Image (cartoon, rainbow, N blue to C red):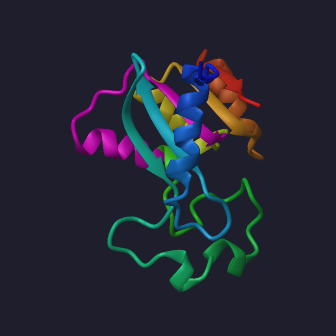
Amino acid sequence: MEAERQRPSWTQYFMDITELVAKRSTCTRRAVGAVLVKDKRVLATGYNGAPSGIRHCAETGCLREQRGVPSGERHELCRGAHAEQNAIVQAAHYGVPINGATLFCTNLPCSICAKLLINAGVKKIYFKSGYADEISEEMLSEANIEVIQVP
C-alpha cells in the first residue's frame, strides 16, 4: 500500500501559490506575490513590477537603487506597482468583487497597499515575511484586519 501523502492545509496551499505568482515579478530588488481568496477560491493574483506596456526595471535599472531610496520609504519613487495593488486592479478589471476576501502575500503589505486593502474590504491577511513599515501594521490593526504571519 502506498504511503499516505500529506495534503497541504488551505493556508499553506494559498501561501504556496503566492510563491509561484512571485516568480512572475519584474522587480530587481524583491519578488512579491499576492493572492486574493474568498470561500477557498482564488479571486485574483498579482505580482510586483512595471505596469503593462512599460519597460521593466531589468531594462531601465532600479529607480530606487539609483536614487538610494531605503526599503519601506518613498513608495512613489518606483516604476513598479506592488503585488497587492496589481491583485486589486486585476479583480477590478474583470469585475470580481473582493469585499470580505482574504489576502495571502509573500510580504506584509506596505502602508499604501494597507490603505487600499482596507478600503477594498479585505478582512484577513496571511503573509510570510515582514516589511519595514510600522504605519501599515498600525492601520491594519486599527481597521480590525486580522494579520497572521505564516512560518
- At a point 29% along the width and 27% down the height, the residue shown is 97
Q: Estimate the x, y position of residue 112 in percent, counting from the top left.
A: 56, 44
Q: Residue furthest left?
A: 95
- At a point 53% along the width and 84% down the height, the residue shown is 60
Left or right: 38 as drawn, with respect to 28: left
The quadrant in which the C terminus is found is top right
Q: Estimate the x, y position of residue 70 in percent, counting from the top left.
A: 77, 63
The quadrant in which the N terminus is found is top right
Work out whether residue 119 or residue 27 is closer to the camera in this orientation and state it: 27
Q: Give yes or no for residue 98 being in the magenta stretch.
A: yes
Q: Estimate the x, y position of residue 23 in percent, counting from the top left.
A: 54, 58
Task: Write down the quadrant of residue 88 in the picture.
Answer: top left
Work out whether residue 96 or residue 37 is closer to the camera in this orientation and state it: 37
Work out whether residue 103 or residue 20 is closer to the camera in this orientation and state it: 20
Left or right: 38 as drawn, with respect to 11: left
Work out whether residue 118 or residue 32 is closer to the camera in this orientation and state it: 32
Count of numbered marks: 0
> Eyeballing the image, is 150 above or below 60?
above
Left or right: 20 as drawn, with respect to 149: left
Task: Write down the quadrant of residue 18 in the picture.
Answer: top right
> Eyeballing the image, is 80 above or below 109?
below
Left or right: 50 as drawn, with respect to 13: left
Q: Estimate the x, y position of residue 15 in percent, counting from the top left.
A: 59, 34
Q: Residue furthest front?
A: 1
> Eyeballing the image, is 51 above or below 96?
below
What span is in magenta? Answer: 85-107
Q: Give yes or no for residue 86 being in the magenta stretch.
A: yes
- At a point 50% along the width and 50% down the height, the residue shown is 21
